[in-house]
Amino acid sequence: MRVKEGISDALLVQEAAAGSEEAIRELVLRYQEPLLRFVKTFLHDKNQAEDVVQESFVRALEKIDQLRNPDSLKSWLWSVTRSIAVDRRRRRERDLKGASRVIEFEDMDLQVSPAPPADIWMARQSLIDEMRGLIRSLPPESRELLRLRYHEQLSHREIGALVGVGAVTVKARLARVRQRLKSRLEPLAREWMQLRDELF
């Protein structure tokens, strides 16, 4: 099935609250995959992520008639899902007797084009690995902000609603994270330019 274009979230919320099975299916179809990607960054477990997303939809649909602003469906779903995912992660960490598991920012789009010359591929791959390492070295809260903004494409306001701060605070925090990355990535960029000049 394909997501239907041109149907607003607000209309789907109205129809789902009225009991429309078609609207409920469309809501699930529209948001299931993005939510799964989102939860996997918390849990690193596909099966648990699927359980969390299913529970999120059940919980959200039970209370969808209470959603005061239907246009905020996306951020509301993310908030419900994040809460369940965090609870699941905390329970798992307790079960593992405090073993630390943190959010990974592992599937940023940093892949290289297939089949470049071996020396170029190796140079690029080395730099990409360093970039990933820099991203992983960020605090979990910073990685979460980056993922929500650039991978899930949530607005500053939507992210703020999820993490419990204002949109201005989110914008400022993201600016600090970007500046931190920029100062550490610039030497890598210069290294790549030098390698490129040598390789070509």
Image (cartoon, helix red, strand yellow):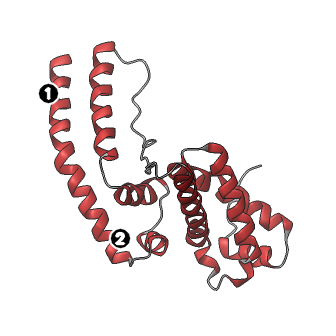
Residue 200 seen: no
How many residues crowd around disc 1 within 10 Å: few (fewer than 14), some, or many (20 or more)? few
- Residue on which the image places disc 2: 170
At a point 68% along the width and 50% down the height, the residue shown is 50
Q: Residue 169 at x, y = what percent?
A: 32, 75
* Rendered image quadrant of residue 65: bottom right
Instruction: Classify mark 1: helix, strand or loop.
Output: helix
The residue lying furthest to the front in this view is 97
Q: Which tag is nearer the camera, tag 1 or tag 2?
A: 2
- Residue on which the image places disc 1: 194
Q: CA distance from mark 1 to mark 2?
A: 36 Å
Q: Residue 196 at x, y = what percent?
A: 20, 24
Is 198 on the left or on the right of 58, as rendered? left
The residue lying toward the viewer, choosing from 104 and 95, is: 95
Q: Residue 146 at x, y = what percent?
A: 38, 56
* Rendered image quadrant of residue 45: top right
